[in-house]
Image (cartoon, rainbow, N blue to C red):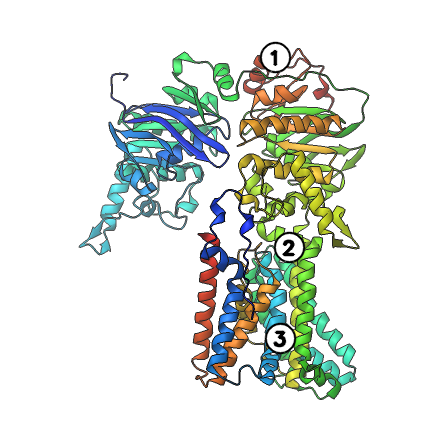
Amino acid sequence: MRLPQSLPVERAAGGRERRLDVRDILTRYGTFIALVLLVVVAASLSPRFLSPVNLMNVFRQVAIVGVLGIGMTFVILTAGIDLSVGAALALSAVLLAGTLQSTGNMVLAMLAALLAGMAVGLANGIGVTVGRVQPFVMTLGMLGIARSIAFLYTGGEPIPVLDMRFLNLGIGYVWRIPIPGIIFVVMLIVAAFVLRYTPFGRMVYAVGSNEEAARLSGIEVGRVKTAVYMISGLTAAVSAIMYCSQFASAPAIAGEGYELDAIAAVVVGGTSLFGGQGGVIGTFLGALIIGILSNILNLTGVSPFAQPLAKGALIILAVWIVGRGHRG
Amino acid sequence: MDETAPILEVERLTRRYPGVVAVDGVDFSLRPGEVHALLGENGAGKSTFIKMLGGAVRPNEGTIRINGSAVDFRSPAEALAAGIAIIYQELVLCPHLSVAENVLMGHLPRTGGVAVDWPAARRRVAALLARLGVSLPLDTPVRRLSTAQQQLVEIAKALSRDSRILVLDEPSAALGQRDLEHLFQVITHLKAQGVAIVYISHRLEEVFSIADRVTVLKDGKLVGSWPIEMVTMPRLVRAMTGRDLGVTSTAVEDATSPVRLEVRGLGRHGAFSDISITLRAGEIVGIAGLVGSGRTELLRAIFGADHPDSGEIVVDGVTVRFRSPAQALRRGLGLLPEDRKTQGLLLDRALRENVTLASLRRFTRFGILRPEREERAVRGLMAELQIAARGPGQPVATLSGGNQQKVVLARWLARQCGILLFDEPTRGVDVGAKEEIYRLIQALAADGAAVLVVSSELKELFAICPRILVMREGRIAGEFAGAARREEDVVDAMLMGGRSNASPAIAAG
């Protein structure tokens, strides 16, 4: 692993910024440094950690929550929150499995999942913009609604997924890399590009940074917000595709609690819950950190009961460090 | 009363912020039982001044003495303990708690040190309210009270701390005439009990009916301090808005250049009514008026940020009804908002993003931003406006007020708007930057832009606007154009309304 050796010292003009303090380094590279430290610790704790098989497994496991985290990043950048992603995943998953079961058409099934995810996002977006319901409340309500529809659709029984071509998406490899990991990285690159190099990306940051200023600069704030919730719904649907193809089953309880893991990945990645600051690369690192932590706890045989404790402590620590850098 | 020793003496109080001196060597004194009005336009330094009195902001220089001994407040709690209570415009009550609980917040009487002694609490609050000469229901949650009543709760709260100095920050802003008279009675009561009061207001009539003395601040400096009998209203207005005229531009607009913006009989309930304005290409029209005259609301309504309920807006000959600022932008309008921090800037984002926010499409190809083009444009604007920054990547929060304002201006230059609405373009900007902004506005007009400028500074309007409209209480109270316009007339119109030196184009609506 390569630590960034030369830090951007030249950005000083007033002299005050010239002494680069720990705080600045932590703010800029904190997540990356944390990931490197974690990898070093993990490798020293378990010889199996660095084996290619294990690393690829981690990558596969991280992909589902990581993809959710990409959509979540867009929402949180606008100072919103989306608690409905886990439920949207479940709804997309059962519709996918149901469509696959009845038609046998894989493309149609995935399309159904994507439409379902985007419909949930659209409903959230309309509630938040037209209805002016707080994002927390709107998406909390949608969490219940979407999951309930999933239960009603399945009648409580998981729908099995048997199409081998489809299952290959979840368990297959391309050049020895798990396909879900590839999907994750491709989506990440697209998202990072959109945020950085498109007007829409700029608008997302603007809305999160100062909504009134954005509005007075001619940005259709309502449209931007609706779009980010739809993106979040879309990424939930992609996660649903990964879920069904990995577990060969679509239960209505799929993705329960994943919204919190996704939010954790975003905040560990340094994106501010107040909006306007952060990005998907951070979320990628955040998802890896959380995934590696669970992996090493499993490898070293730590009790599953203690694992949420470690995760919780890590989240608080990460946000505390980043927060100190931002506010001080 | 002049014999009494002052309870509060302030000497050479100074507070600097990056790029601007908010309060610059101000002297002030206050005697027991005196009502001392503090006047000044927005940005004159009043709020920074009272924040220093109240311990919310620490001065860089100068001294504050209470009863002759110097104090240095490190927190609002210390100021309160020393007997200074500030009642801000935004009341800070707990809406769900009762009147009694709010008044005695933090020091409710207790029996045996544990349970609240409610009978004692009610007695104390009733006594305090009696001192004010008012009666309020003690057990009602304050959210059910009117604004005027909530204000009384705040005052009672201050008295419960034995405050001897009461600072009222624009107490009348949210009050109707009857509530105001009531407030004056309360103030008279307090005066009689020896409480010293600093009264801040924009409404001069009030100052004349309640104050014993008046002090005027402008651009952070003390303009003067007089017993109320010594001054007249026009003199105060001139003290507040500045009298020394710089280079005035009096060229009346070319009546043949096309009309870009026409406002006919525009009204918005509670803000302004029956406003008609014609704005031609290349013209700079100023709007004068005291704070609260509806100037800002008018600009916002033209821009689609708020919705007018009567009249019409015509842009380039087409009647429009903007439902959002985005639609106004598409018609070539741009608004420089009154408060750049809350309405203009993305403070934690880079200068670059702030500048190109309204014109992102100019820098795209196939929907994708072209960073090098954007960079070039931003650097060009930085040079043109002489924005002092390390580079396009610097967060605007770290720039000085003047440079921040230039960033918002640059946003509209990047957009190449033909119709510009400027609301207080030089508020909180240092003198050097002010002149650069004036030159820029004139250059824009010379290039054919139509510009409407709202300003609290008459000097500013006279310097850049050949035609000045005066707003008063939501209406146009006068129009002054050409070399014949006089500052005295504008001031009269701001105060009394109803005079013009121009042909009554305003009657056309």
In the rendered image, is residue A217 in sight? no
In terms of secondary structure, where does tag 3 sit? helix
* Tag 2: amino acid: Val
Q: Is residue B368 rendered to the left or right of residue B339? A: right
Measured along the vertical axis of the image, is residue B446 above or below residue B305? above
User: Which residue in the structure is indicated by mark 2?
Assistant: A204
User: Which residue in the structure is indicated by mark 3?
Assistant: A63
* Tag 3: amino acid: Ala
Instruction: Give the residue displayed 49% in from the left and 21% down from the top.
Output: B240
Instruction: Give the residue displayed 42% in from the left and 42% down from the top.
Output: B145
Marks 1, 3 in one chain: no
In 3D space, how far apart are the residues under numbered discs 1 and 2 (Cα atoms)? 49 Å
Instruction: Give the residue displayed 56% in from the left and 27% down from the top.
Output: B432
Image quadrant containing the N terminus of chain B:
top left
User: Which residue in the structure is indicated by mark 1?
Assistant: B486
Give how far across and how far down residue B368 sits, in percent.
75, 55
Disc with the residue nearer the chain's start (3 vs 2): 3
10 Å crowding of disc 1: few (<14), some (14-19), many (20+): few
